[in-house]
Amino acid sequence: MSRPIRVVFLGPPGAGKGTQAKVLETRYAARQISTGDILRANLAAGSALGLKAKTYMDAGELVPDDVVIGMMEAELGGLPSFILDGFPRTVAQAEALDALLVKLDRPLTGVLLFDADRATLTERLTGRWTNPRNGRTYHAVFNPPRVAGICDEDGGPLVQRPDDTHDVVVERLAEYDKKTAPLIGYYAATGLLKRIDGLQSIEAVTADVLAALDDRNEAA
Ligand code: AP5
Ligand code: MG
């Protein structure tokens, strides 16, 4: 099955956006575009963009809108199917995305909001292990790799993100409440928003995501 999907994954840090985006990428032949992964790759490469983003990311703050919007314009052109994971994160970013998609004549087909309570989000993030080469994430308890510290997929080492410490997670959640949560009303008004209970098992969340996307595509 490979219908075009153009979806936004919305939700606080740790809600499972990246985990589910990886599952959908294969199923729908859609590209996951994770602003966090792109910023971290820039940081690792020592690019000007990465250096600009570093202080904000280290502190758990959002990177300024103009930096992220410019970066996304370059990413989105020509893609028939995509999963936006972690973008938009402010109303200004959402407005810029709308304008860009009108220009490309590729409207969004859905917006999924993942959520979970704060204690769960914190537990997930502080126990997360990441493969910086392919963006795959694991969890020490909830989703362990076959061999501790090693990615199932490429056999390379897993790392803990520097912003997954307890104190930075608190900041990231506060940034979400202040700057990103207003997007729930923004997208509810478009009729595209569907809520997904992110507290369930990874497999149960995937089942709900697939149902939500199929409904949306059939209704379109
Ligand atoms: P980013 O990399 O996007 O991080 P985030 O939004 O803080 O979200 P996470 O990746 O931490 O959470 P997730 O929902 O993807 O969870 P995951 O699936 O990994 O952004 C990082 C930084 O970059 C930002 O702080 C900001 O500075 C900057 N930035 C990025 N985008 C920006 C933008 N648009 N504008 C401005 N600045 C931007 O799951 C988490 C853990 O839980 C994993 O260990 C996983 O295995 C586990 N897990 C997942 N689902 C389940 C489940 N159902 N049950 C049990 N465990 C689960
Ligand atoms: Mg993520």
Image (cartoon, rainbow, N blue to C red):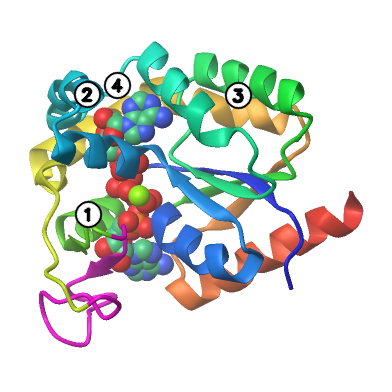
Task: Give whichever of discs 1 and 4 has the lower sequence position.
Answer: 4
Contact between marks 4 and 2 (CB within 8 A): the answer is: yes
Against 35, residue 165 (above or below) is below
Front position in the image: 143 or 105: 105
Tell me the amino acid under the disc marked 4: Val
Q: CA distance from mark 3 to mark 2?
A: 20 Å
Find out if the beta carbon at label 2 lies less than 8 Å from the nearest ligand 1 atom: yes
Farthest residue in the right direction?
Answer: 219
* Left or right for 12, reference 152: right
Q: CA distance from mark 3 to mark 1?
A: 28 Å
Against 34, residue 146 (above or below) is below
Where does label 2 land, which residue? 53
* Left or right for 67, reference 197: left
**Which secondary structure, mark 1?**
helix
Contact between marks 3 and 1 (CB within 8 A): the answer is: no
Name the residue at 42% across, 25% down: 71
Q: Residues within 10 Å of mark 1 (few under 14, many from 20)?
A: many
In this rendering, which labeled residue sits more in front, label 3 or label 1?
Answer: 3
Task: Give whichever of discs 1 and 2 has the lower sequence position.
Answer: 2
Where does label 1 land, which residue? 125
Q: Which region shows up in magenta?
A: 134-154
Tell me the amino acid under the disc marked 1: Leu
* Left or right for 38, reference 48: right
Task: Give whichever of discs 3 and 1 has the lower sequence position.
Answer: 3
Where does label 3 land, which residue? 97
